[in-house]
Amino acid sequence: MKRIVVGVSGASGMPYARHLLEELAARKDVEVHLVLSEGARRVLMREGRGPAELEAYAAARYDPADLGAAPASGSFPTAGMVIVPASATTAGKLAAGIADNLLLRAAYVHLKERRPLVVVLRETPLPAVTLEALLKLAHAGAVVLPASPGFYHDPRTIDDLLAFVTQRVLDHLGLEAPGPRWEG
Ligand SMILES: Cc1cc2nc3c(=O)[nH]c(=O)nc-3n(C[C@H](O)[C@H](O)[C@H](O)COP(=O)(O)O)c2cc1C
């Protein structure tokens, strides 16, 4: 069983989180451990039907304030983590080594244990402070994978665009990913 930590922070783009969670929940060999930040809970009231909509896909859900929960420790085995969507605040704090909520602590653990960590940033435009934070995260071993779908696969629906990002995230988590691929 592959245990994947999914952190959702307070950036716009909750459909990216829902699409990935739906895909992960459909797999028998994956167990999703979900942390929604306080920011995510606020955005979810605007971009969906609230936290319960995402929590339904997870095997385990955590209080973001619970720094004693399992994903806070490197001794809790996981196959990787994704932050989707990742706010500029979460990216900046993580790059600075700040782990003052469970989402950040779990992400910090993935960096220190050198496990896969995918950061699906959603912000535009990007100021120098955020660009520098992303560079630090890349140097620390994270995959910075902006929520920036391509258009070469001829997307017709929003779901097609979400699927593009989900496929790239799954690739970086080492999970088989469905969907069209560029074949030249
Ligand atoms: C409706 C809404 C949309 C937001 N969208 C973004 C966004 O796309 N990117 C971003 O970096 N911050 C965005 N924010 C601001 C973050 O939610 C805010 O900086 C928050 O402190 C992030 O905290 P967190 O990273 O702990 O979730 C948005 C806030 C609201 C209320």
Image: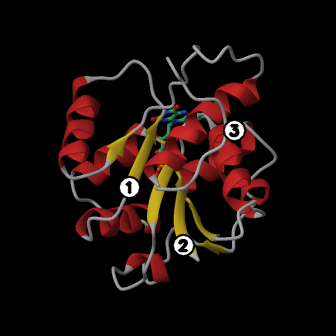
Residue 123 picture location, percent across and down: 45, 28
- Residue type, label 3: Pro
**What residue did someone put label 1 on?**
117
Which residue is rendered at x = 44% and y = 84% of the image? Answer: 68
Horizontal side of 80 relative to 132 (left or right) equals right
- Residue type, label 1: Leu
Which residue is rendered at x = 48% and y = 54% of the image? Answer: 82
Packing grade of label 2 (10 A; few <14, some 14-19, many >=20) is: some
Which residue is rendered at x = 40% and y = 68% of the image? Answer: 106
Mark 2–mark 1 Cα distance, whole angstroms, equals 13 Å
Mark 3–mark 2 Cα distance, whole angstroms, equals 22 Å
Residue 159 showing in the rendered view:
yes
Packing grade of label 3 (10 A; few <14, some 14-19, many >=20) is: some
Q: Which mark is residue 3?
A: 2
State whether residue 73 is above or below residue 56.
below
Between label 3 and label 1, give the one nearer the viewer.
1
**What residue did someone put label 3 on?**
15
Numbered disc 2: secondary structure:
strand
